[in-house]
Amino acid sequence: MKTLLAVTVVALAWSSTPAHAAVAVLACEPEWAALATEIGGTLVSAESATTPEQDPHYIQARPSLIAKVRRAALVVCTGADLEVGWLPLLLRQAGNAAVQPGQPGFMSAADFVEMLDKPSSVDRSLGDVHPYGNPHVQTDPRNIGKVAAALADRLASLDAANAATYRARYEDFAARWQAAVARWSAAAEPLKGRQIVTHHKGWAYLENWLGLVEVGNLEPKPGLPPSAAHLAELLEQLKGQQVALIIRSTYEDAKASEWLGSRTMIPYVVLPHTVGSVAGADDLFKMFDVLVKTLLDAKS
């Protein structure tokens, strides 16, 4: 009955919405573009500055992206310095005062979640360490829910004439998302306490959500490519440990995980770090469907 009521409210709000130009949303990563579409539907035109195959730490500030920032009414990024290597240049070159940090047209997802792995000090000798904490917040679906609430409020503020529609669509999304998170959490219960090795320290929020225990990284330091010496040390370190999985993202080179997996017989998997990053992860719901299924299948 609650689901039917939510759908009815969304339908009524939508039917009463006059035609207007879609709010241009530029997301730094595909997950936030997908979330904007969930909340805004056809009221927004959302696209991502990065593709699912790209490392969001490192992309080129191309003229086409500068033009998209110039046209945007809202820029949504992860923040916490994930995009520090390219986003400031885009914002500066675009000259769009409405989407600068601190303005209503700019939003950082990291501002609305509890950050993990905050360093006590930042030293470049430690690698690519983020001073505000681990920025890969999207790997915990509970964080997606928190950002969704903030994004709905921001869209309602920027497009006040359609505020009721954004709020109705958010309520519908939130109900479906909460049910899905409960389902994923229950299905993944057997994974709790499992030891994993990751390519990059990009899964802290997934580990916090599911109770996975990270015991090593293929990168010797965050952001540095795996080296032969480090992999040899890691191989020795893992002897006698019950490691369940080696995890990497689509954009990370497979050679290191394959090398370690072939010498330890530990399964290695590619998890969807964003929408569209692996086959079947076509939206936010399917992204976590695939993620949880991949973990469970590899475990068995």
Image: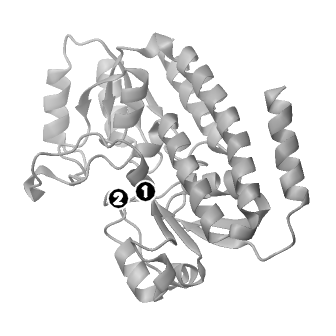
Which quadrant of the figure contains the N terminus?
A: top right
The secondary element bearing badge 2 is classed as loop
Q: Which residue is identified by label 2?
A: 82
In the rendered structure, the answer to whether residue 237 lies left or right of residue 198 reads left
In the rendered structure, which amino acid carries the disc numbered 2? Answer: Leu
In the rendered structure, the answer to whether residue 198 lies left or right of residue 36 reads left
The secondary element bearing badge 1 is classed as loop
In the rendered structure, which amino acid carries the disc numbered 1? Answer: Thr
Query: Label 2 near label 1: C-beta < 8 Å?
Result: yes
Q: Quadrant of residue 200?
A: top left
- Identify the residue at image location x=55%, y=26%: 292
Say the numbered circle drawn on residue 78: 1
In the rendered structure, the answer to whether residue 20 lies left or right of residue 33 reads right
- Identify the residue at image location x=39%, y=72%: 101
Considering depth in this image, is 250 or 155 the residue closer to the camera? 155
Residue mark closest to the camera, 1 vs 2: 1
Residue 278: where, in percent of width, then height? Answer: 58, 43
- Identify the residue at image location x=18%, y=46%: 221
Mark 2 surroundings: few (<14), some (14-19) or many (≥20) residues within 10 A = many
Mark 1 surroundings: few (<14), some (14-19) or many (≥20) residues within 10 A = many
Whole-Å distance between the Cαs marked 1 and 2?
7 Å
